Amino acid sequence: MLGGEVVAESVRSRRVLETSHPPVYYIPLEDVRPEALVRTERRTFCEFKGTASYWTVRSGDRVEENAAWCYPEPSPGYESLRDHVAFYPGRMEECTLDGERVNAQAGDFYGGWITAEVRGPFKGEPGTQGW
């Protein structure tokens, strides 16, 4: 949710786990309102998944720059992420998983989704720099 509107809804997301991270959920692009995403110039590199591209998310009266990302050409082993997008839950008004409101992973770089069943510590929290 952003700006009082649903941006994406899916039962086909991909759950990705990385060391010392809560899960990140990648949603098929076809399950996202296309007018809500505007590509940006931002790029980052993950040693595992490859080069990420970013989107600004626009919905209702809200605009969140670089609040979603994808891997257009994922590295070998991560091909299932092609045509999927992930959202920073801390940049959205609300993200839910199976009806439970998620908490965002700490920090401004990581996009993990924390639910009652997920336990830390996680990268991004105070004192975790350099893990």
Image (cartoon, grey):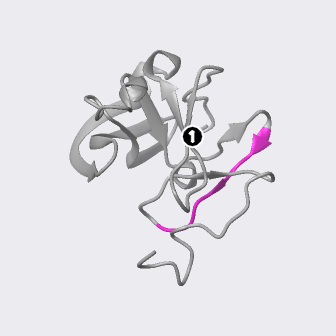
Q: Bin the neighbour count of mark 1 within 10 Å (Cα to Cα): few under 14, some 14-19, many 20 and up.
A: some
Q: Where's the N terminus, which quadrant?
A: top right
Q: Residue at x 33, y 46 (%)?
A: 48
Q: Does 103 appear in magenta?
A: yes
Q: Say above or below: 75 vs 120.
A: above
The residue carrying mark 1 is 3
Direction from residue 18 to residue 94 in the image, left or right: right
The answer to which image quadrant residue 106 occupies is: bottom right
Q: Mark 1: which secondary structure?
A: loop
The answer to which image quadrant residue 36 occupies is: top left
Q: Horizontal and vertical percent for residue 50? A: 27, 42
The answer to which image quadrant residue 12 occupies is: top right
Q: Nearer the viewer, residue 15 or 60?
A: 15
Q: Which amino acid type is marked by label 1?
A: Gly
Q: Residue at x 56, y 27 (%)?
A: 8
- Residue lying farthest top? 30
Instruction: State how many labels appear.
Output: 1
Q: Residue at x 66, y 20 (%)?
A: 11
Q: Say above or below: 20 vs 62.
A: below
Q: Say above or below: 29 vs 78.
A: above
Q: Does 64 appear in magenta?
A: no
Q: Horizontal and vertical percent for residue 30? A: 46, 15
Q: Say above or below: 65 vs 80.
A: below
- Look at the image and give the residue range highlighted in magenta: 100-107
Q: Horizontal and vertical percent for residue 45? A: 25, 51
Q: Nearer the viewer, residue 76 or 88?
A: 76
- Residue lying farthest bottom? 127
Q: Horizontal and vertical percent for residue 18? A: 51, 52
Q: Nearer the viewer, residue 48 or 111?
A: 48
Direction from residue 111 to residue 130 in the image, left or right: left
